[in-house]
Image (cartoon, rainbow, N blue to C red):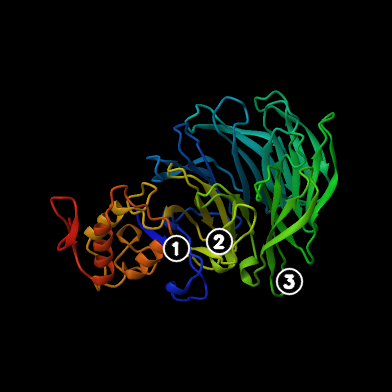
Amino acid sequence: MKRKLAICRIRCGEPLETRSCLSATVFVESEIDSSAELSIWGDIRAADLDGDGDMDVLSPGSDGVAWYENMDRAGTFGERRVISVDESDRTLIHAADLDGDGDTDVLLATWVYDEDAESRTFEVSWLENTDGAGTFDARHQISTDLYWPQTLHVADLDGDQDLDVLVGSRGSGVVWIENRSGVGDFGNQRMITTSNADCVDTADLDGDKGADVLVANGNGIYWIQNLGESERFGPEQVVYQPNYHHSACVHAGDFDADGDIDVLSGWKTEDVVPTGGVAWHENTDGNGEFGRTHLITEPVGAMWFVNLSVFAVDLDRDKDLDVLLSSPGDRTISWFENTDGRGSFGTEQRNLELKNVQVLPSLSIFPSDLDGDGDQDVLYSSSDNKIAWFENRLTGDVNDDGIFNSRDLVEVFQLGKYEDEIPRNATFDDGDWNGDGDFDSADLIMAFEAGHYVFAAKTTAREIAAAVDCVLGGGKMWRDVNGGASSGSWW
């Protein structure tokens, strides 16, 4: 599998040595499928579809809904397996255990255009994972009278310990469909709000342990209280209403580590000059009072033109929530670090650069641990028919054991590519940690300035001095019989 480095980098191109904020997190891109024939709208999910404990990939395309098996629990993916054939021009997907049997089923919402009638039909349905190993049966229809569905979600909305279906649309408002028996028997379609929805999420926003509903649409960000009485929901309550707001995405999470759930939002316009922003909204009393909005970024330009997505996810392994977002117009996936664990976000935009793709009308992303190493990777699909993922790597950690230490330096220098004067012949595992294709002093400076090098317990001052001499002085190193290090050749 060919891998390419997509280092988190600053746009303005300043020398590495002058950067004041360096991240220990880099991303290495691996391709899953370059000819998937994806819809212009796109969607992507990661879920364990075959019950083997790792994350597989689920994606709709022009050939139907398909999945890719994670073959080795480390992110090597097999061929595309179609599980549902359709002729839809847009398919939304979600993965969850809808029938309570312990495996992962697939939830769908489809748009189908009838050329003869010059109209579209819409359907919400689900596919049962019949053997827990990724064999799916025919579709089970849930609803055909929800118009222009935009987003799917599942949650236990009525407190009966099974997963209900939540659909946000631009023609039928936001509705929830009850899982009546817990085995995928859906009925009792109920309106939560008549407002349109571009994105929905659920979380306990008022501390009463019920699943409240978050809605993002062209008028703002709202939350709707789950009253827990006769399965009723309250009125819309405003979280945020930016000016000239066209569409938005929303995600829940505790950004300031105070024990309650805050709200992350991204919004865009489609004016002559597209603009947008990303912010988090503080739950000031733990009861759903959102009085403070903290702007994370307010970019301008084509990056906000289509298909905005935001996620709250810990990308740098420090146990707080960072922000991940897609930017199709400039072909990047970006993230912002929660620098203090309290909701202060760095101003530097760090990008995962998409290789060999055109300017995209659509870019879908999904965070998940695809290689089973305990950190969050980034899965993406683009409307130029590419599915790939970015492996979350620690700068300098070439043996991928989660630690940057002397073992990595020994391994990478033994490869012999350090300042070998052969242009662009190095990968991440060869020492190219800043993404310029070469292994040189700039990579070492970057790795050590990130501040996460772990010295061995028995490392001596002589060994450290010799290592510095080797790196900065151009000498070689060897280990003598007494365990010391001296100038000479590699040990």
Disc 2/disc 1 C-alpha distance (Å): 11 Å
Please state which amino acid type lies under the numbered disc 1: Ile
- Mark whose residue sits in front, 3 or 1: 1
The image's mark for residue 246 is none
Where is residue 456 drawn, in percent x and y? Answer: 31, 49
Query: Which part of the image, by quadrant, shows the C terminus?
Result: bottom left
- Residue occupying the far front of the picture: 461
Q: Are marks 2 and 1 in contact (CB under 8 Å)?
A: no
Secondary structure type for disc 2: strand
The residue at which mark 3 appears reads as 271
What residue is at 39 percent from the left and 60 percent from the top? 4
Secondary structure type for disc 1: loop
Please state which amino acid type lies under the numbered disc 3: Asp
The residue at which mark 1 appears reads as 7
- Residue occupying the far right of the picture: 235
| For residue 71, above or below residue 158 | below
- Mark whose residue sits in front, 3 or 2: 2
Where is residue 287 drawn, in percent x and y? Answer: 79, 42
The image's mark for residue 334 is 2
Please state which amino acid type lies under the numbered disc 2: Ser
The mark that comes first in sequence, 3 or 1, is 1
The mark that comes first in sequence, 3 or 2, is 3
- Given residues 244 and 448, the one toward you in this image is 448
What residue is at 66 percent from the left and 28 percent from the top? 184
Secondary structure type for disc 3: loop
